[in-house]
Amino acid sequence: MSTTIAEEIVDYDEALERYDPVMGLEVHVELNTATKMFCGCATGFGAEPNTQVCPVCLGLPGALPVVNEKAVESAIRIGLALNCEIAEWCRFARKNYFYPDMPKNFQTSQYDEPIAFEGHLDVELEDGTTYRVEIERAHMEEDTGKSLHIGGATGRIHGADHSLVDYNRAGIPLIEIVTKPLTGAGARAPEVARAYVGALRELLRALGVSDVKMEQGSLRCDANVSLRPRATSGQSQDDVPLGTRTETKNVNSLRSVERAVRYEITRHAAILDKGEKITQETRHWHEDTGVTTSGREKSDAEDYRYFPEPDLVPVAPTRETVASLRGTLPEPPGERRRRLQNDWGYSDLEMRDVMNAGAVELIEETVAAGATPAGARKWWTGELARRANAEGKGVEEFGVTPAHIAELDGLVRAGRLNDSMARQVLDGVIAGEGAPSEVADARGLELVQDDGALEAAVDTVIAANADVAQKVRDGKVQAAGALIGQVMKEMKGQADAGKVRELILAKLT
């Protein structure tokens, strides 16, 4: 259980009355190459600690790195997809700092000569408006190892008995995508942050360069937030100097990105309201309490003593290579969404619900598995999205697959299950009881197909509710709803409500 204590904050709307938020988002993407950035070690997730290492990624004396060609190609494709310019010549640099999970005591990265620069990504918000995120750079580097802090209550170094380091992740290819300062979002800044990381994840998944599993750390967001005073009369907001920023590190879900930005805005405002100064520092996000806590004072670029990496030759992609890689880019996600919306027959509102639930790919796979577009949308953005919101999860975190939903939709369309029974089956799937058909069999869930039994139940209910039946005979058809409910109760929910309605109306009208 976390013992973090929230700092003083102010009401969010009040903060926005006095201050203008500015963000800078740095997204680290682990590439899905078979080997590491500068050596031949495997990159698979979940291996036994320190089993995917060698002299190069451990930084042993005399070990020389070699650049991963596939990683460079992926970096160029990412840059092109972000509308960036691609450098005709760039090189790696050493970023010097000591940290236990940095076996070389420096990180091989890029500094003033990135592979891609000056791009943009247009992001669609929940109400359909578009915000353009300007991209400053996308550069290549290597990931660090992972520190495991043993003992203590929080899993962090403070209060731990000792620490262990797993270097399997050290050297895995990373692309860091850095935005320019994001201004003008106002109160929607947290929403913009979430939408941008979501759109970026969607784009990277479409490119096939990463599995973008935020829960496993293959996509992580560092959220920089600062506040500046609202412009006075006659003054342009752009002329107001930027405030001091804080950087919330390694936020690993879309929901957390939005919450972390929002919290930092309210925390900064409380400090500034008291006439105090913001400390430029890194912050840790705590999912359980919804607050950030101080990490370390943030270094500036000069503190890292960057200098060109002497053991690696420059990277100089030819125009022909860049043109060839441009030809491999997939359909842009925005165009793809519009095409899918047309194919599925969704309204703008329905498609927006699908996007907000993060279910575009899930529905696409579900339809491909045999579901109707309407059925796929109903389950992913209805029942599963409701549960996800209630539990603070993503719809993909329940262990339910597109094949499960397609099978469930098929059982409903085939007349074996009604919606109520299908929800019970979904409960079983989530509980790990098996595929939908297996759950339905094990729980004995199946609509009664015996017309005689159904008609007998209808007759019994009509006889027991003569006054309601008479209202239906008198033309008040809506009164049939009460009779339908009684029949469903009589049949223990195992009847087709539509068929019950037809029988009742046939007998009474």
Image (tube, rainbow, N blue to C red):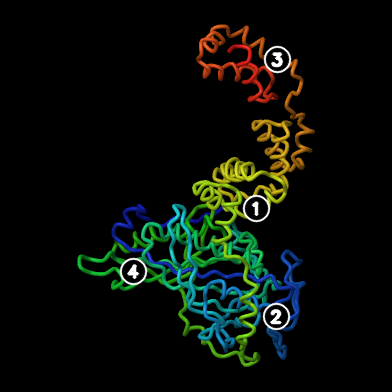
Number of numbered tags placed on the structure image: 4
Residue on which disc 1 sits: 364
Residue on which disc 3 sits: 455
Task: Give the foreground label among 2 and 3.
Answer: 3
Pick whichever of labels 2 and 1 is earlier in the sequence: 2
Residue on which disc 2 sits: 57
Residue appearing at x 73%, y 76% in the figure: 35
Residue 277 tag number: 4
Q: Quadrant of residue 331?
A: bottom right
Name the kind of residue labelled 4 in the image. Lys
Residue 455 seen anywhere in this rendered image of the structure: yes
Mark-to-mark CA distance, 4 and 2? 40 Å
Pick whichever of labels 2 and 3 is earlier in the sequence: 2
Task: Give the foreground label among 2 and 1.
Answer: 1
Dot 3, how many residues are within 10 Å of its Cα: few (below 14), some (14-19), or many (20+)? some
| Element marked by disc 1 | helix
Residue 266 in the image: x percent, y percent? Answer: 38, 57
Q: Quadrant of residue 313?
A: bottom right
